[in-house]
């Protein structure tokens, strides 16, 4: 199974890096932790929305629609799916304290990038989760002179107790045990990609063989 960090695939070089990862692995399925920004994918891919997306596409996927130009892109938004024998769940969006208590219907424009309390609650009711995808990090994983994690994501790990949590957004590889859960922040696709053994949950890393400029 192919596992991908942020791709920001809005430019030709970053899109090529994303597609090269698919070509290198030729997977049956892929997992992506958000900021994908390209939705015509060569293999079935389950992903969470990040804070940089085409939010008209994301809204359509939330509604169960399949817009033109979208192929093999399956959104996990406080939902779960069975992928190669694994129960994979995901929380889409990132945290903003000024939007957290609002209903999703009141989030407009770029503010659609955030998750809200109701979505945390729906995610917490999911059962038998093996792998949890989130764009926002839990506490205790990423530091910039302060803890960049979100307490609500930490709480979800405590409740769901998955075997593995995969995290995007920060463009850096970090590993830690958070709330008893092995948690990995993924490098971005223009640096490398991962493969995941569905039976052992062993995660392996390979450099992406295409150079791409990081986003500004």
Image (cartoon, rainbow, N blue to C red):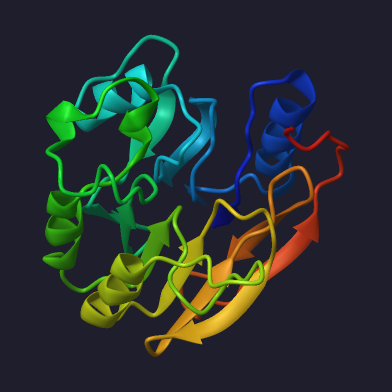
Indicate the position of residue 165 as horizontal and vertical percent values: 44, 70
Q: Is 180 above or below relative to 13?
A: below
Q: Quadrant of residue 196?
A: bottom right
Quarter the N terminus occupies = bottom right
Tell whether 147 sits left or right of 23.
left
Q: How many labels does the image show?
A: 0
**Of residues 173 and 130, which is closer to you in this image?**
173
At horizontal 31% and vertical 30% (from top left) the residue drawn is: 112
Q: Quadrant of the C terminus?
A: top right
The quadrant where residue 146 appears? bottom right
**Rendered location of residue 142, percent (x, y):** 59, 70
Residue furthest to the bottom:
180
Q: Is residue 215 left or right of residue 169?
A: right
Foreground: 136 or 161? Answer: 136
Residue 152 in the figure: left or right of residue 210: left
Residue 52 is left or right of residue 12, and the answer is: left
For residue 168, which quarter of the picture?
A: bottom right
**Residue 54 sits above or below residue 35 on the image:** above
Q: Where is residue 213 in the image (x, y as percent from the top left)?
A: 83, 34
- Residue at position x 45%, y 41% from top? 50
Please tell me which residue is depicted at 26% across the width and 45% down the height of the picture. 77
On the image, the x and y values in percent for residue 136 come to: 44, 56
Residue at the spot 57% in from the left edge and 55% down from the top edge: 3
């Amino acid at each position: 199974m192919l596992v991908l960090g942020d791709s920001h695939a809005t430019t030709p070089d970053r899109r090529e890096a994303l597609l090269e990862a698919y070509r290198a692995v030729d997977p049956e399925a892929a997992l992506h932790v958000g900021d994908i920004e390209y939705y015509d994918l060569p293999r079935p891919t389950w992903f969470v929305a990040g804070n940089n997306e085409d939010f008209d596409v994301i809204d359509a996927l939330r509604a169960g629609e399949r817009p033109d130009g979208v192929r093999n892109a399956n959104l996990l938004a406080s939902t779960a799916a069975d992928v190669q024998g694994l129960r994979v769940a995901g929380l889409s969006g990132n945290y903003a304290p000024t939007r957290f208590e609002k209903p999703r219907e009141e989030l407009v424009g770029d503010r659609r990038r955030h998750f809200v309390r109701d979505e945390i609650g729906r995610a917490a009711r999911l059962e038998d989760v093996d792998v949890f995808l989130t764009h926002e990090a839990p506490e205790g994983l990423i530091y910039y002179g302060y803890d960049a994690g979100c307490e609500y994501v930490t709480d979800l790990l405590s409740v769901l107790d998955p075997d593995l949590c995969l995290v995007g957004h920060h463009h850096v590889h970090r590993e830690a045990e958070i709330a008893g859960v092995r948690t990995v922040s993924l490098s971005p696709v223009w640096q490398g990609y991962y493969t995941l053994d569905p039976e052992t949950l062993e995660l392996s890393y390979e450099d992406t063989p295409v150079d791409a400029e990081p986003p500004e």
